[in-house]
Image (cartoon, coloured by chain):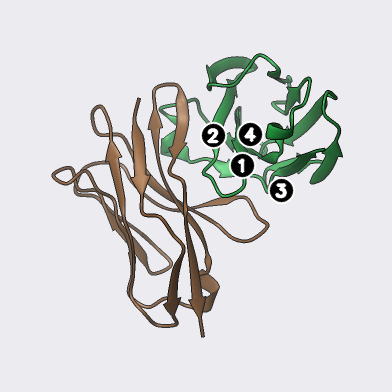
Amino acid sequence: GNSVTQMEGPVTLSEEAFLTINCTYTATGYPSLFWYVQYPGEGLQLLLKATKADDKGSNKGFEATYRKETTSFHLEKGSVQVSDSAVYFCALPSGNTPLVFGKGTRLSVIA
Amino acid sequence: DAGVTQSPTHLIKTRGQHVTLRCSPISGHKSVSWYQQVLGQGPQFIFQYYEKEERGRGNFPDRFSARQFPNYSSELNVNALLLGDSALYLCASSLANTGRGHNYGYTFGSGTRLTVV
């Protein structure tokens, strides 16, 4: 089935630094791709998605571009804030599985 | 409107016991899916129900079962609990089934934290 691999964390950045969290996928066809975020003690929230190749998803200053040439969907943000501290998950559907998640990348932003 | 509601938020069980977790989807959503998230890992798919029928099952033992009621709420049951079942159990709801569900999105609840001792 389809799968994703995302970079291991934790990632620690200073406020206003540039963020990249790598995600690569293995898939049959071109499924939709997602980034979810999990704040401490909470469930998952959809951060952004892209439904076809070359699409760019964006939300709250975060962006990710669906690149079929490199089978990647890297998450980026130009200037992180302390409030962005959370765990980020890359995900995609696979067969009858609504979402297959990566292992998650913990981001800590320090003031 | 209320989001996805899960209950209880926390519980502690002893090995060998059984547990029932509950999920109420967003009003109008007909699909509910369940995930297990072990500490430090990504969520793992357990079940999906749509219109009260099972539409998908992950790689979990038969000790795990679920059902969906006419009002689209759902229960996840786990029998003969093991220490390894300790996890955050997440429920997600959507308007539609797998495949089309992504056109509408999945909304997650805050989860039930199960500890087996």
Q: Nearer the viewer, mark 1 or mark 4?
A: 1
Q: Position of residue B104 (x, y in %)?
A: 47, 39
Question: Amino acid type of disc 4?
Answer: Gly
Q: Chain of mark 3?
A: B
The residue to which callout 3 is attached is B2
Label 3 vs 2, first from the N-terminus? 3
Q: Position of residue A86 (x, y in %)?
A: 53, 63
Label 1 vs 2, first from the N-terminus? 1
Q: Is residue B53 above or below residue B83?
A: above
Task: Check disc 1: other Cα within 10 Å, few if <14, some if 14-19, many if 20+.
Answer: some
Q: Is residue B7 above or below residue A106?
A: above
Q: Is mark 1 in CB contact (under 8 Å) with mark 4?
A: no
Q: CA distance from mark 4 to mark 2?
A: 25 Å
Residue B28 numbered tag: 4
The residue to which callout 1 is attached is B38
In the structure shown, which secondary structural element does the residue marked by tag 4 occupy? loop
